[in-house]
Amino acid sequence: MSIKSKFLNQSILGGAIAGVLALTSAATAQDVPIVQPGAPGQDTRTLSADEAVQLANNRYSDADVAFMQNMIPHHAQAVEMSALVADRTNNGDVAAIAGRIDASQADEIAFMRTWLTERGEALESPHAHHAMGHAMMGMATPEQMAQLAEASGPEFDRLFLELMITHHEGAVDMVDHLLEQSGSAYDPLLFDFAGDIKNEQEAEIRRMGGLLRGLSADPRSNLTPGFRDAGEAISGLIHVATLPKPTGFFDPENPAGLPPLIESDEDEDEAADAADEDDRPEFGARSPFLSFSNTDMAFSGDLMAVGNYHGFNLYRLGGAEPELISSVVCPGGQGDVSIVGDLLIMSVEQTRGRVDCGRQGVSEDVSADRFRGIRIFDIADPLAPRQVGQVQTCRGSHTHSVVSGPGEDGVLIVYNSGTSSIRDEEELAGCVGDVPGDSSTALFRIDVIEIPIANPAAARIVDSPAVFADDETGQLAGLWRGGDHGEGTQTTSRTDECHDITVFPSLNLAAGACSGNGILMDISDPRAPRRMDAVSDTGFAYWHSATFNNDGTRVLFTDEWGGGGRPRCRVQDPMTWGANAIYSIEDGELDFNAYYKLPAYQSDEENCVAHNGSIIPVPGRDIFVQSWYQGGITLIDFTDPANPVEIGYFDRGPINGDTMVTGGFWSSYWYGGRIYATEIVRGLDIFELAPSGVLTENEIAAAALGDQGDTFNPQQQHPVTWPDHPVVALAYLDQLNREGALVVETATAMAAALGQARALMEAGESDSELSQTLTDLSEDLSGVDADGRNGARLTALRNTLTGIAAGLE
């Protein structure tokens, strides 16, 4: 039924209701006084029967009137924008969108004017746009309208679609705002009208998003969907291999993890109405009992552990691709892992986790069978891991950080980050919830855990410090209290937990991504972390992870806007929301430098937001490989922290083209000269760096020579060191040449000498004459004038040349 037809029918019904009200009024006439008290100290006012009836009439509210009054100019601007299309583009798809907008919104404006007029309400609000503001309404500013009017061709198409998507999202926000108001949209006609607006605007947003992605030159924006046959785009990387999930870690009847399909029972008329929405199938919204999502990784020697909500898998490295050697079923999620010697530590937070690793879950509210916390496995025999210890925690374990040890005392210190609900105290003593005034609450804390290496069964929590407390008052909720930061800003989670804590033991530092804040901690005493600084951001929704650069002077924080399960890299999503924020550490404080967000538009079927990654140890540069769920992985150079740039990527199309499946890359880490990336649904991918105009063969070879130790755990960083090798010197030389810091003659002579040195060192030979040449070249560099990062590269190059020269004696 059209809006006009519905309004006509409702008008007839309204007349009937008015007649009934009149009869009711006459039947209930009374002689007793009707009064309305005023504010304290004011006189009481006597009301007439007509006034009393008017006050009792709640068929529509002030919020309803304001919605209609504000939506009229909102729609009018969309019509105005659409009128610009005909003379500025020959893009038929854009013209079709504009035609639909012009027709539908002009009709809706007429309806809204009639609705207001028949109720005796003004067509314009005396406080137009005041309640919500232009930002919430998504309306273009006068400057943006002028820019649109001046544009033409593809530039007009892009700007029109960008502005109209934002405009439509504003209309959706207005509907949501209306329905949040108590007593609003009580009028069935208005309720249906608001719902129609939201449905139509969301459908058009999808169409326009697809058109805008089609205008993008980035190949990632228009990849074809598929579980095993999705389109792919790659730059700056070599895709070495893809390994599917092992048996037992996916549903064989539904390996892609699709939600159940809902069979349509629409009649022919409804089906015809739905055809305009691309005839998309409908899927269920509930999640299955078991989850098989791949999660985080850890490495030790030639062993790689891949966490999963269902347990973990162990692989042997060293061949052309990883070899699966064992699969461990132990459900509970999220399954983040770390390795220390012969021990594997795993985080468990779901309420279905069991002490005995059973897959049947726990149905009781309180149960001795439930496990939430840190599991400890002995993997001395990786073919048969054994659970040897457990630490139950109040909020489970979402992630954990290996902080220090084992030292002379044989004890390992681990920080636990619990982000889930607080357990019933009957199940675990001492677990106090969000009880006002109770300072023993499990909120606003992290757990410090000791694990005796010789007796993991004795592992225990030794403290749960309140690292967010106010320094002066001691109040537990001492940092961000939750909510937005003002009009047009993000709604940021309350700081009552840390999601990730990354430690840098050699500098006694830890960086915490703690829901509502990024924090820097002193961990000189690992058992008593002390907060040094805390920062907030008006665009961050949830501070998720933190990574130091190689020398611990910068921190890259990520924002998991939408929790990882939402499409947050669409054309309409802000480039500073769901992004990275880069900070420098200056005198123990965090100093903001810049944002970075994946530059490739993704579709509505791709969950995409900043997630886990690691430093790639190219000497002289800060390069970060990062996962973006279904946005793929990207290589980011943030050597200049104020201007981070993308230098490589890999991406696949959505898992399914009709519905979003939570998938894509969870983590991507550099280890042993390769990048390993866990794909939530599809499995495991392995990459190598490829030479390009922004990354040379020497830099790649030098990265492979970097010594990052025999173990890599996700939230523990140790500074990488490089040997005095000609390839390392050549990497520095390439960087200095790229920025024009050396004269050509010096660079040419140095490259030739280093080439000779490389051949001799690989052959195990010496050459005192070449050694002297390298020494002389090193001394010549002392006269080169450079500062900042090039100054640091020159110093590193001189030191490396000196070391090479000594090795050739």
Image: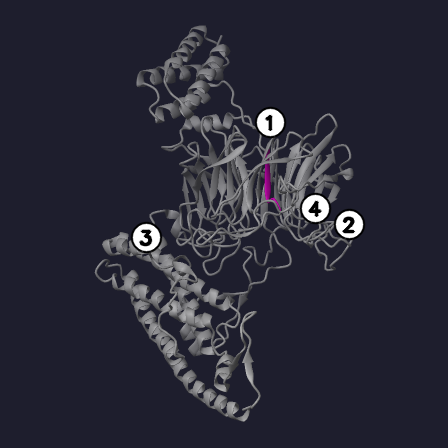
Q: Nearer the viewer, mark 4 or mark 3?
A: 4
The Cα–Cα distance between marks 1 and 3, rounded to whole angstroms, is 48 Å
Report the side of 491 relative to 472 (left or right).
left
Q: Earlier in the sequence, mark 4 or mark 2?
A: 4
Q: Nearer the viewer, mark 3 or mark 2?
A: 2
Report which residue position mark 1 lands on: 506
Q: Nearer the viewer, mark 2 or mark 1?
A: 2
Q: Say if 783 sits above or below 253 in the image.
A: above
Label 4 residue SS: strand
The Cα–Cα distance between marks 1 and 4, rounded to whole angstroms, is 27 Å
Q: Nearer the viewer, mark 4 or mark 2?
A: 2
Closest to the observer: 428 or 93? Answer: 428
Q: Quadrant of residue 326?
A: top right
Q: Quadrant of residue 465?
A: top right
Q: Badge 1 local density, few (<14 within 10 Å), some, or many (20+)?
A: few
Classify the position of the N terminus by image quarter. Answer: bottom left
Magenta-drawn segment? 497-503
Label 3 residue SS: helix
Colouring of the image = one colour
Asked whether residue 207 is drawn in magenta, I would say no
Name the kind of residue labelled 2 in the image: Ala
Residue 146: percent from left, percent from top: 26, 55
The Cα–Cα distance between marks 3 and 2, rounded to whole angstroms, is 59 Å
Closest to the observer: 278 or 23? Answer: 23
Q: Which mark is residue 373?
A: 4
Report which residue position mark 3 lands on: 215
Residue 254: percent from left, percent from top: 57, 58
- Residues at discs 1 and 3 in contact (Cβ within 8 Å): no
The Cα–Cα distance between marks 4 and 2, rounded to whole angstroms, is 14 Å
Closest to the observer: 559 or 109? Answer: 109
Q: Nearer the viewer, mark 1 or mark 3?
A: 1
Q: Badge 3 local density, few (<14 within 10 Å), some, or many (20+)?
A: some
